[in-house]
Image (cartoon, rainbow, N blue to C red):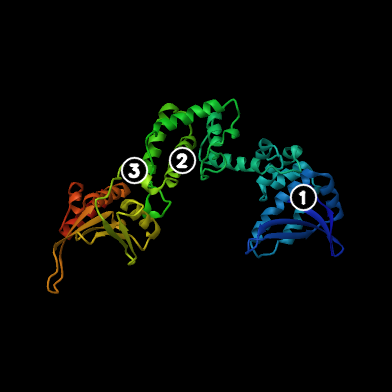
């Protein structure tokens, strides 16, 4: 039989229960192997209950001291009950100076105290009892998150000015630098918002006209990493010139904002429009093409269909490309020519039929290899082939028919 004897408004602060005739402190902490919350209990006395009921600060200090023991129990272990009981008198019944001295010797959860209103300055000077004079039952998790974020920055030697902090809040990256940035003007104090918007406008002007296209080699919604890096470098250079006093975190969050917005615009653009924006569109002169991947899957395209050959091909790549599927072919059976794209090697082969097979003999082909410069290079080559066949690729060389020569060129490029 379990009865609640005392609990506070915040459900996470430990409660006191009566179980099997004895008083126990009950708290939830951590999770089990199934990610369900774990609950721990350990015995307390009547004198401990009296302090817990009357003194919020001591109650919170006990919670902070016990939580590391719960963490040590892990997903299946038992709470070290003796260690937990040993904390009761020193935390709840000792003089404030002795409590402060105890917390200099034991592990404790700083974030819980900060979330419940502890004075951070006093806390960091080791004056825990004094720090908790401002404690509240209601928790402010964001306050603890901000404290942890500032601690991480301090460990890296990063100091934020008021405008730095305002920009990080505007992009939603003040607490977590890995969060996808967004524009949140309501998170900035009205006095600083105009200045923040002027800084953002500087970043926007720096990357005006730049785009981050998709990279179907990495999936349907993947974006061109090289284009991302180019835009990020451009924005960061412009912001650093205009605001040399900014912290690195501030400069990075602005480039991240610009790049993520550009990438999202590309993801939401139909493939036909995406190709046109990239400057590789055009009306195909081919009437029918066959697309295949390294797994033997084939897709046919005809000019009387609703979409361009270039868009159809890159959609095929986006659907099928994977770590074990990085070779794609476009073939014009009628003209006896095609190209084979080797994404794993940043290379391409163009294949033309020199002589048709007669009387059961195999056809004779000319195979030439070329190096490709990223997804932009592939886009140009695919578009050129669709428009004019292998002959249209002459200006995109050099082309090498000798395999050994081609491999030397590949190795040389990797070494550069």
Q: Which mark's residue is nearer the viewer, 1 or 2?
A: 2
Marked residue nearer the N-terminal end (1 or 2): 1
Residue situated in front as seen by the camera: 259 or 71:
259
Comparing 159 with 308, the one in front is 308
Residue beneath label 1, please? Answer: 90
Distance, label 3 to label 2, CA atoms, is 19 Å
Q: Position of 379 compared to 208: left or right?
A: left
Count of numbered circles in the view: 3
Mark drawn on residue 261: 2
- Give the left or right position of residue 86, taking residue 167 as reference: right
Q: Residues within 10 Å of mark 3 (few under 14, many from 20)?
A: few
Residue matched to label 3: 276
- If you read the primary sequence from the N terminus, does the residue marked by circle 3 or circle 2 appear first? 2
**Quarter of image, res 163:** top right
Q: Nearer the viewer, residue 182 or 394?
A: 394
Q: Is residue 272 above or below residue 166?
A: below
* Crowding at mark 2 (Cα within 10 Å: few <14, some 14-19, many 20+): some
Q: Quadrant of residue 237?
A: top left
Query: Which residue is at a point 13% across and 72% down the rendered structure image?
Result: 361
Residue 393: percent from left, percent from top: 20, 50
């Amino acid at each position: 039989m379990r009865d609640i004897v005392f609990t506070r408004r915040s459900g996470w602060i430990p409660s006191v229960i009566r179980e099997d005739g004895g008083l126990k402190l009950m708290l939830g902490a951590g999770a089990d192997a199934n990610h369900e919350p774990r609950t721990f209990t350990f015995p307390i006395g009547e004198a401990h209950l009296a302090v817990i009921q009357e003194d919020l600060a001591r109650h919170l200090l006990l919670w902070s001291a016990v939580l590391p023991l719960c963490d040590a129990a892990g997903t299946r272990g038992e709470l070290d009950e003796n260690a937990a009981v040993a904390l009761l008198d020193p935390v709840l019944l000792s003089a404030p100076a002795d409590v402060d001295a105890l917390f200099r010797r034991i592990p404790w959860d700083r974030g819980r105290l900060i979330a419940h209103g502890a004075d951070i300055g006093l806390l960091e000077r080791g004056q825990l009892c004094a720090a908790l004079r401002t404690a509240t039952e209601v928790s402010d998790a964001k306050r603890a998150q901000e404290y942890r974020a500032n601690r991480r920055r301090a460990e890296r030697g990063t100091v934020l000015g008021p405008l730095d902090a305002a920009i990080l809040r505007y992009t939603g990256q003040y607490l977590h630098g890995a969060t996808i940035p967004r524009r949140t003007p309501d998170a900035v104090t009205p006095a600083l918002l105009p200045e923040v918007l002027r800084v953002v406008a500087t970043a926007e002007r720096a990357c005006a006209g730049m785009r981050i296209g998709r990279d179907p080699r990495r999936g349907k919604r993947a974006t061109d990493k090289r284009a991302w890096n180019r835009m990020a470098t451009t924005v960061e250079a412009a912001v650093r010139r205009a605001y040399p006093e900014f912290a690195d975190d501030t400069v990075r969050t602005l480039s991240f904002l610009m790049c993520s917005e550009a990438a999202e615009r590309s993801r939401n653009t139909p493939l036909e429009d995406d190709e046109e924006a990239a400057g590789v569109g055009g009306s195909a002169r081919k009437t029918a093409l066959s697309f295949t991947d390294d797994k033997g899957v084939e897709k046919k395209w005809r000019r009387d269909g609703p979409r361009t050959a270039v868009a159809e091909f890159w959609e095929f790549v986006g659907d099928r490309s994977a770590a074990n599927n990085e070779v794609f072919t476009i073939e014009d059976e009628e003209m006896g020519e095609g190209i084979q794209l080797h994404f794993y090697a940043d290379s391409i082969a163009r294949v033309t039929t020199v002589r048709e097979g007669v009387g059961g003999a195999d056809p004779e082909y000319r195979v030439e290899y070329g190096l490709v410069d990223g997804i932009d290079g592939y886009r140009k080559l695919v578009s050129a082939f669709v428009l004019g066949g292998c002959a249209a690729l002459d200006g995109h060389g050099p082309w090498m028919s000798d395999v050994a020569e081609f491999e030397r060129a590949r190795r040389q490029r990797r070494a550069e």
